[in-house]
């Protein structure tokens, strides 16, 4: 990794542009001591030079410039085939094999993507739980329409998606026969290991690889995210270009980059007792982006008895529920607000004769302007109430904007993790429940 990153670093020095911008003004007054630039520099060097804990899982840093072009073309071809022969795609996966794809589809298309008029397949997410009601509902929503399945599991052995895959594979076989089903199953897994890989090779499923050196929560820019994303008609080439730009900007500017500044700032706030970070956005479409972010930061930093607890809120809705706690509860919170400078669509408040609801003072004003005022008001109130505020701004809710955010948050997460002295790429804690569950279920190897 070291020479490769070094090489790219020199290539991009000239072309740096600030894609994600960050504003710390609302946080500065809360630092117990100034953000530790030297520690941030050391963490940055550790990541870039590949000398830290978990350094066999930093392949995601290079992904935007170093992805498999042949596989990328196969992903695009598979997406076209699914678009042409299926009205629905069931995406089976959990954690890092699920959240990224859902985040980008909701952010760039809509949380209501399935219900909106379109000429791309509906997407149903399965295997992220063990709910018989959820499975039944998905089967009912597919009905007698043509569908395909993308089963995603890096290890190929995770129980929740494996159960869902059995169910949807059986449904495919019932509808299309055993051979017909095979041509509608797309497997994204390890290149050599795991039960899913064995099955995919035996049955001849079209397969895509989760690279060895990319962990689940850092994998959205691999086939894990790209195939479902491409099926929805999102431009995955534009995604990769956006990711390249943000990556290059961070590598070039180092401690002056938005990613490193964010890592530094949240660590300074953590040192001051702000051990909960709430990620807020004013777009309902951001909800699953926040879920993706929570996994990224929670699994990367919450270990060895330390770590900032990642939570999320959706404004304005949560101003009328969590707002009370944020304004007035224990002062252990920091707030990071992600905003998009331009909406995808503009709307103005209509004029009403006689002003029956006393709202004509807003008539003719854009909702985006009103929302901006709300954001300013919330920011001032929360800072006054003792909640440090970090603002993350992206110009637009588009492919580039999403990719910039992904790179920004991933790089910041790794650097923040190294600053706090943990391995940001492992997740030993998630094994505990599995051990108990397997034992209760009587899994043969568990006893
Ligand atoms: O980030 C991670 O590594 C996890 O969330 C995994 O992605 C999740 O447990 C699913 O694992 P797998 O892809 O092996 O089925």
Image: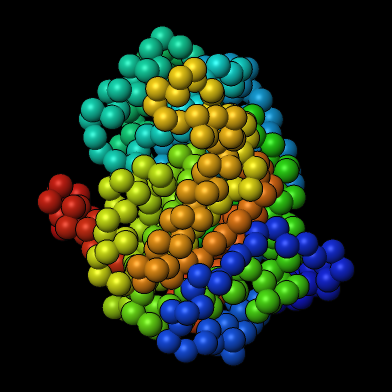
- Up/down of 50 relative to 154, above or below: below
Q: Position of residue 141 (x, y in %)?
A: 37, 18
User: How many numbered dots are placed on residues in this image?
Assistant: 0
| Residue situated in front as seen by the camera: 195 or 273 | 273
Residue situated furthest front in the rendering: 354
User: What residue is rendered at 52% in x and 49% in y?
Assistant: 373
User: What residue is rendered at 57% in x and 83% in y?
Assistant: 40
Q: Position of residue 323 (x, y in %)?
A: 32, 54
Please tell me in which quadrant of the rendered image residue 426 appears: bottom left
- Up/down of 120 relative to 212, above or below: above
Residue 57 in view in this figure: no
Residue situated furthest top in the rendering: 144
Side (left or right) of 351 relative to 273: right
User: What residue is rendered at 46% in x and 82% in y?
Assistant: 31
| Residue situated in front as seen by the camera: 44 or 320 | 320
- Up/down of 87 relative to 100, above or below: above
Residue 271 in view in this figure: yes
What is the basis of the colouring in this image?
Answer: rainbow
Q: Quadrant of the C terminus?
A: bottom left
Q: Position of residue 53 (x, y in %)?
A: 49, 79
Q: Quadrant of the N terminus?
A: bottom right
Q: Position of residue 65 (x, y in %)?
A: 74, 58
| Residue situated in front as seen by the camera: 134 or 322 | 322
- Up/down of 57 relative to 324, above or below: below
| Residue situated in front as seen by the camera: 230 or 383 | 383
């Amino acid at each position: 990794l070291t020479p490769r990153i070094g090489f790219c670093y020199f290539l991009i020095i000239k072309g740096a542009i600030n894609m994600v911008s960050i504003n710390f003004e609302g946080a500065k007054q809360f630092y117990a001591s100034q953000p530790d630039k030297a520690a941030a520099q050391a963490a940055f060097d550790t990541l870039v030079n590949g000398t830290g804990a978990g350094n066999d899982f930093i392949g995601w840093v290079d992904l935007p410039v170093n992805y498999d072009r042949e596989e990328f073309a196969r992903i695009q071809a598979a997406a076209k085939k699914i678009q042409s022969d299926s009205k629905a795609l069931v995406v089976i996966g959990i954690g890092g094999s699920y959240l990224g794809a859902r985040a980008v589809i909701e952010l760039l298309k809509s949380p209501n993507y399935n219900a909106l008029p379109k000429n791309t397949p509906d997407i149903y997410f399965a295997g992220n739980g063990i709910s018989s009601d959820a499975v039944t509902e998905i089967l009912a929503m597919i009905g007698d329409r043509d569908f395909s399945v993308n089963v995603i599991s890096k290890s190929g052995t995770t129980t929740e998606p494996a159960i869902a895959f059995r169910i949807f594979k059986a449904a495919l076989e019932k509808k299309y026969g055993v051979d017909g089903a095979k041509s509608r199953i797309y497997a994204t897994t390890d290149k050599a290991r795991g039960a899913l890989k064995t099955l995919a090779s035996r049955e001849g499923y079209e397969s895509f690889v989760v690279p060895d050196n990319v962990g689940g929560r850092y994998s959205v820019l691999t086939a894990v995210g790209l195939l479902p994303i491409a099926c929805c008609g999102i431009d995955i080439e534009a995604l990769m270009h956006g990711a390249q730009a943000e990556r290059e900007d961070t590598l070039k500017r180092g401690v002056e980059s938005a990613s490193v500044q964010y890592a530094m700032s949240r660590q300074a706030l953590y040192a001051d007792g702000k051990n909960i970070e709430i990620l807020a956005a004013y777009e309902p479409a951001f909800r699953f982006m926040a879920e993706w972010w929570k996994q990224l930061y929670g699994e990367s930093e919450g270990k060895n008895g330390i770590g900032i607890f990642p939570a999320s809120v959706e404004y304005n809705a949560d101003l009328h529920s969590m707002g009370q706690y944020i304004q007035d509860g224990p002062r252990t919170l920091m707030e990071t607000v992600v905003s998009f400078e331009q909406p995808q669509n503009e709307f103005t408040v209509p004029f009403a004769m006689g002003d029956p609801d006393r709202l004509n003072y807003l008539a003719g004003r854009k909702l985006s302007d009103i929302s901006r005022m709300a954001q300013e008001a919330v920011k001032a109130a929360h800072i006054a109430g003792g909640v440090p505020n970090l603002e993350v701004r992206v110009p637009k809710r588009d492919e580039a904007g999403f990719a910039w955010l992904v790179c920004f948050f991933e790089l910041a997460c790794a650097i923040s993790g190294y600053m706090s002295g943990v391995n940001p790429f492992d997740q030993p804690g998630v094994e505990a429940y599995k051990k108990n569950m397997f034992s209760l279920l009587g899994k043969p190897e568990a006893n």
